[in-house]
Image (cartoon, rainbow, N blue to C red):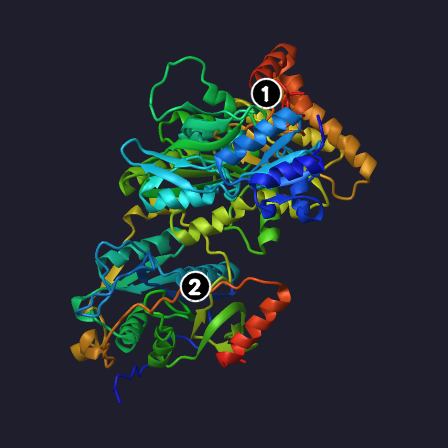
């Protein structure tokens, strides 16, 4: 791989205005890391693309010159996926932020990759539709969401990003612009290359447009907050809740510990509840009666499984008092410590209790605070290792040790390394450990088929 | 001058004692059903808010009032009764108060109460309070999100001839027949001692209101909410209630004009500061 040289900059500036080709001190330090900040790397040049033609020119040039290209959206990732660990060109897509088509006959919306999730939600919401995937970070770009197959809280009912991407238009390293998939509902036409690109974190191609499926926006929704004596009793109720046919949109678990951190962070109290843990359920639908009947069934079920009570979170004020806390869990944990690292393993729903118990034991054994929260409905856990007052050496050692134990436990329980954040740079070794050499070799060959020279986001996912 | 005085005594001068000999409090909380959206249209002909087809909810300020009452009940014992005035559907917010923890609820509902301004509303509520019997404290939200006057609470206190305090940020304690209250006077916080029975309106965000409980809802399924008409009240002079008891003439209701004119300045910090300064000078803001 080559570094960017003056002649390369000259080429880039031959078809791009200088203000969109930034080097040195003109590159904001934020571009040297992502949201988590532990993985660092400064790109040689930051290019802010505005069209697929520009992306095509940049890629074919970089491919000829063997310069790494790291595609970056809003930089909200947590695994170093969009960090230029080996320099090269950082290709930023946030200026490609147009919503290019709303097709109400086929219920699709076509967007450029730099459209922010919050802007897409607003755009379709105003027209009576919903784009169901809802990762907590709404200032992320759709391109980033597709690249990590982002999930979110509504996954229980609606699925994840992959379930809503009908087609992607992507630029291959050689500069060809190809559309994979289409607006069709059914498709049995050969390998699904679209599905390989989804979740590939910029290692196979650069997404320049995507057509997404939208659904009619539910008219009614309410949340239920069910406090339980313990985490175990709360989470044990989940499989039955899912089986019950009440069709929850979201099933989150909250622990007393993380609720307290959120209260400190926000400087306001969470509505008073009993017990050490709670389930936060959401129901949506098209009639108030239907939603309320399903919520009542779920309430009965929770109480039957040991909930102290079930609280009804029905108005904007009440939703705000509960969800404002849930939304800041990550920030609250971040604010509670000096440094932290995270893992977002996903285990089968039935194994959450066992996995959480293991986290508790691990925390005691290695002497490190490990708060966690997550999606009880889909087994996706967000686990945070907090450095607190640890010395650098001890912190790095305990972190490594903790992650090793945690990922091997997750694998033992039939889990996967990442539920929604991706592999990026930070989780590569755990992916290799979890999938084994045969599957990693297949991934390497797939990567080679798309990107034989290995210029696209090198050192990410596979090495 | 409108002559509508409530003459007789209005309950004990101090909190009464429970069986353990500790002071316990009977509290009344006034709540109101309001539109659940801020985008309520105004009928251009009648100038009245169009409430049809608009979903309703409890006035958000009243949630803080209820929570404050529940906290006092927890500390001192006693009861919390919710009181509202409105059409039959206002029953919904009273049920909600029961699900949150109120012990009983009263709805003042009568076609003759319709069209009431703050004076007639406060008078009607004061009449209801009298009928409700002994109380130590009335708690109200400091205002509603629809009417926004913030006057009903204080005017009720005047009708009842009891002291009142507005914009309380906390009711600290109750002892020797008086509440110690902190009130927000915008630029300062006053600590007041106010003798019971009294009326206190609470500021927003002073607590986190508890959520309605499914179990309480189940239990309250058959709960009776007392519905009182004018015939149930001591003063039955129709001219004191509703539109006829309302001296306020609303000439016009209109949504405030929304200005979203904006200008974007670009330049260095220094240039922007100069630009802003001269603009503020020009507009005589500084």
- Residue B16 is situated, as x and y percent measured from the top left of the image, at 45, 70
Residue A451 is marked as 1
Q: Nearer the viewer, residue A100 or B53?
A: A100
Residue A371 is at least partly visible in this image: no
Residue situated furthest bottom in the rendering: B1
- Left or right for A224, reference A102: right
- Left or right for A439, reference A285: right
Same chain letter for marks 2 and 1: no
- Residue B155 is situated, as x and y percent measured from the top left of the image, at 35, 78
Residue B271 is marked as none
**Is residue A129 shown above or below A57?**
below
Q: Quadrant of the C terminus of chain B?
A: bottom right
Name the secondary structure under disc 1. loop
Contact? badges 2 and 1 (CB < 8 Å): no
The residue lying at 50 percent from left, 79 percent from top is B282
Callout in the foreground (2, 1): 1
Residue underneath mark 2: B65
Q: CA distance from mark 2 to mark 1?
A: 64 Å
- Label 2 marks a residue whose chain is B
- Label 1 marks a residue whose chain is A
- Left or right for B103, reference B91: right
């Amino acid at each position: 791989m080559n570094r960017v040289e003056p002649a390369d900059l000259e080429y880039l500036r031959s078809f791009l205005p200088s203000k969109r080709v930034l080097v040195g001190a003109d590159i904001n330090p934020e571009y040297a890391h992502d949201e988590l900040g532990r993985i660092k790397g400064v790109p040689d040049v930051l290019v802010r693309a505005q069209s697929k033609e520009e992306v095509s020119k940049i890629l074919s040039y970089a491919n000829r010159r063997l310069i790494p290209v790291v595609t970056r959206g809003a930089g909200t990732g947590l695994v170093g996926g969009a960090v230029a660990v080996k320099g090269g060109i950082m290709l930023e897509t946030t200026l490609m932020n147009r919503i290019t088509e709303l097709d109400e006959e086929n219920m699709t919306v076509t967007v450029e990759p730099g459209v922010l999730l919050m802007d897409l939600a607003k755009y379709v919401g105003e027209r009576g539709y919903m784009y169901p995937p809802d990762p907590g970070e709404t200032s992320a770009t759709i391109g980033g969401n597709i690249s990590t197959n982002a999930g979110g809280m509504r996954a229980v009912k609606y699925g994840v990003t992959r379930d809503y991407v009908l087609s992607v238009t992507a630029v291959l390293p050689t500069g060809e612009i190809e559309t994979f998939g289409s607006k069709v509902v059914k498709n049995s036409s050969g390998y699904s290359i679209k599905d390989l690109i989804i979740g590939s974190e910029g290692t196979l191609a650069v997404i320049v447009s995507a057509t997404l499926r939208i659904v009619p926006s539910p008219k009614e929704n309410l949340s239920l907050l069910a406090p339980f004596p313990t985490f175990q009793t709360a989470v044990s109720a989940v499989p039955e809740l899912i089986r019950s046919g009440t069709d929850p949109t979201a099933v989150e678990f909250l622990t007393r510990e993380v609720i307290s951190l959120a209260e400190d962070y926000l400087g306001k109290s969470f509505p008073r509840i009993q017990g050490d843990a709670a389930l936060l359920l959401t129901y949506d639908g098209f009639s108030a009666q239907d939603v309320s009947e399903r919520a009542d069934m779920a309430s009965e079920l929770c109480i039957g499984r040991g909930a102290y009570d079930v609280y009804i979170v029905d108005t904007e004020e009440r939703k705000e008092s509960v969800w404002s806390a849930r939304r800041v869990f990550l920030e609250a944990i971040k604010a509670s410590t000096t440094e932290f690292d995270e893992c977002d393993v996903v285990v089968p729903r039935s194994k959450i209790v066992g996995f959480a118990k293991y986290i508790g034991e691990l925390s005691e054994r290695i002497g490190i605070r490990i708060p966690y929260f997550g999606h009880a409905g889909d087994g996706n856990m967000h686990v945070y290792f907090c450095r607190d007052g640890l010395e650098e050496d001890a912190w790095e050692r305990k972190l490594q040790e903790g992650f090793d134990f945690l990922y091997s436990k997750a694998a033992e329980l039939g889990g996967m390394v990442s539920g929604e954040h991706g592999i990026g740079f930070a989780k590569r070794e755990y992916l290799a450990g979890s999938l084994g050499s045969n599957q990693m070799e297949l991934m390497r060959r797939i990567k080679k088929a798309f990107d034989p020279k290995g210029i696209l986001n090198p050192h990410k996912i596979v090495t | 001058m409108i002559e509508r005085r409530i003459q007789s005594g209005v309950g004990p001068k101090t909190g009464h004692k429970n069986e353990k000999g500790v002071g316990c409090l009977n509290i009344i909380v006034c709540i109101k059903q309001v539109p659940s959206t801020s985008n309520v249209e105004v009928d251009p002909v009648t100038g009245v808010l169009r409430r049809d087809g608009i979903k309703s909810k409890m006035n958000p300020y009243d949630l803080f009032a209820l929570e404050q009452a529940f906290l006092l009940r927890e500390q001192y014992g006693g009861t919390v009764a919710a009181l509202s005035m409105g059409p039959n559907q206002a029953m919904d917010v009273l049920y909600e108060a029961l699900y949150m923890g109120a012990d009983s609820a009263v709805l003042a509902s009568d076609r003759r109460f319709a069209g009431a301004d703050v004076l007639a509303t406060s008078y009607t509520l004061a009449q209801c309070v009298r009928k409700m019997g002994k109380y130590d404290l009335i708690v109200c939200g400091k205002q509603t999100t629809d009417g926004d006057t913030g006057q009903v609470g204080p005017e009720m206190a005047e009708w009842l001839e009891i002291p009142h305090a507005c914009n309380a940020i906390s009711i600290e304690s109750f002892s020797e027949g008086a509440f110690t209250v902190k009130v927000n006077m915008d630029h300062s916080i006053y600590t007041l001692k106010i003798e019971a029975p009294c009326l206190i309106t609470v500021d927003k965000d002073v607590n986190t209101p508890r959520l309605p409980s499914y179990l309480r809802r189940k239990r309250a399924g058959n709960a009776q909410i007392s519905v009182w008409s004018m015939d149930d009240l001591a003063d039955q002079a129709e001219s004191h209630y509703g539109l006829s008891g309302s001296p306020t003439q609303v000439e016009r209701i209109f949504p405030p004009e929304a200005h979203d004119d904006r200008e974007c300045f670009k330049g260095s910090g220094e240039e922007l500061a100069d630009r802003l300064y001269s603009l503020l000078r020009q507009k005589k803001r500084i």
